[in-house]
Amino acid sequence: MTIKNVAVIDIGKSNVKLTLVCLNDLNEIAILTQPNDVLPGPPWPHYNVESHWVFLLNGLLNFQKLHGIDAISVTTHGACIALLDNMGNLAAPILDYEHTGPDEFEVEYNKIRPSFSETGSPRLPMGLNVGAQLYWMFGKNTELKAKTASIVTYPQYWGHRLTGVAATDLTSLGCHTDLWDPYSKKISSLAEKLGVSAKIATIINSHEVLGVILPEIAYKTGIDPDTPVYCGIHDSNASLLPHVINQPGSFSVVSSGTWVIVMSIGGKQPDLDPSKDLLINVNAFGDPVPTARFMGGREYELLIGQKTTEPTDKEIEIVLLEQSMLLPAVIKETGPFGGRKSNWLGDEPSIGSNKRAVVTGFYLALVTAHCLELIGHIGPIIVEGPFVKNRCYCMMLASVTGCEVRAMNGETGTSQGAAMLCANDLSFCVESSAAIFTPGSSLDKLFKSYSKVWKESLTAK
């Protein structure tokens, strides 16, 4: 069967998307989206998966009618697992990782979690470590562990709903779960301590076929019942995949969204400090990837509050000359400047103003540049996601790093990467267009002066 059109289920922290991607050229034919709303409980804040399911089925029906679907792939945010009972239903609602409940058992959990040297996973707040989620949920509901027949990672939860097959994938297990040893490529020692070793569903590669769609899904959507569903992938690794395949030499990928995930390939060997939100991710081929992260998309939303017009060159130059700037961290619970409270140098620009948009773009770029330095970046910087449209961000990032910045074309690199999993040969090459930003522009001296003051202000008393 020749696969041309791939329907990609893309569950981000802020939005749920369904994208139809042409596998021949990775062109995004159609995109549907809805907010990823969280229900308050009981028993804890959880994702509204039934609303998502209705949205996805309606979208698949629409795509099938208009274009036809040859395969389905899935990509989702990390820090998320689903507990299935012996009937394949949810044994408990899927916990929202931003819930602070797991912090309740922080001391107890820290006694059993593996070291950073084993997992490459830093100790994170809330439910950002899946191991902490499990420890807390089992502690709050003493019957839940016995009720849980299998544990699946989040992309495979949606794959399970489509096929009835339970599985996990390496990229999701390797996303600061505390459950994966990326160096030995096996389940970490935590699984045995939690008593879940036998419950973690079969691990398969992201590009393997999970199964074909269930008959009832075929009936509801009109999709051929033999349509394959691929295992799926963690969203940041979906953004990374096309470049791991097609980009020679050393480079880094910046995957922007609610989280900004910065990943280095072939760079210097870094000495990762887990206290700075540095970690090891696992790519689609099972290889460890030095990674830094901060909640840049969420910070952008908090700072901007509404859409602004595109700042002019003159407005950018004025901000550079005035050196109006923002110091980290707007969200101080995560990122390399975690624990530090943000503050403005100079007057705070009004919400809705282009000046605020310029300063925000510069702020996000400077934090990103710091992340790149911490993970040993060398070579070009490839930006995916919403930040590709932020000219101030891309200009500052190119100047402060001295590297070429490629702002990739497309609404979301995650959907394109997830679609690539359905290709017969993962080494196929697709030329993707990008806006190129290079250091050495006419404003380069002003950019460098601005970044120098920003860095010095971080250490000033």
Image (tube, rainbow, N blue to C red):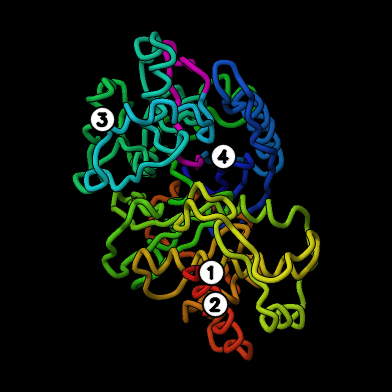
What residue is shown with label 3?
112
| Quadrant position of residue 246 | bottom left
Tell me residue 172's x, y (percent): 39, 40
Q: Position of residue 127 (x, y in %)?
A: 46, 33
The numbered mark, 1 or 3, whose residue comes first in the sequence reads: 3
Q: Is residue 56 left or right of residue 106?
A: right
Question: Which label was assigned to residue 218?
Answer: none
Residue type at mark 2: give it. Answer: Ser
Residue in the image at 50% along x and 40% along y? 74
**Magenta residues, start to end:** 73-93
Q: Which residue is mark 2?
A: 451
Q: Are marks 4 and 3 in contact (CB under 8 Å)?
A: no
Q: Which residue is mark 4?
A: 11
Q: Which mark is residue 366?
A: 1
- What is the secondary structure assignment of the residue under circle 3? loop
Amino acid type, label 3: Ile
Q: Position of residue 457 (x, y in %)?
A: 53, 72
Q: Is residue 455 left or right of residue 326?
A: left
The residues tagged by marks 4 and 2 sit, at their Cα atoms, a distance apart of 35 Å
- Is label 1 in a helix, a strand or a loop? helix
Q: Residues at badges 1 and 2 in contact (C-beta under 8 Å)?
A: yes
The kind of residue tagged 1 is: Leu
Q: Is residue 155 above or below residue 196?
A: below
Lower position in the chain sequence, tag 4 or tag 2: 4
Q: Is residue 229 visible?
A: no
Most common secondary structure along the magenta stretch: loop
How many neighbours does mark 4 have within 10 angstroms: few (below 14), some (14-19), or many (20 or more)? many
Residue 212 shown in magenta: no
First in sequence: mark 4 or mark 1? 4
Residue lying farthest to the left in this orientation: 184
Q: Is any part of residue 129 visible from this angle? A: yes
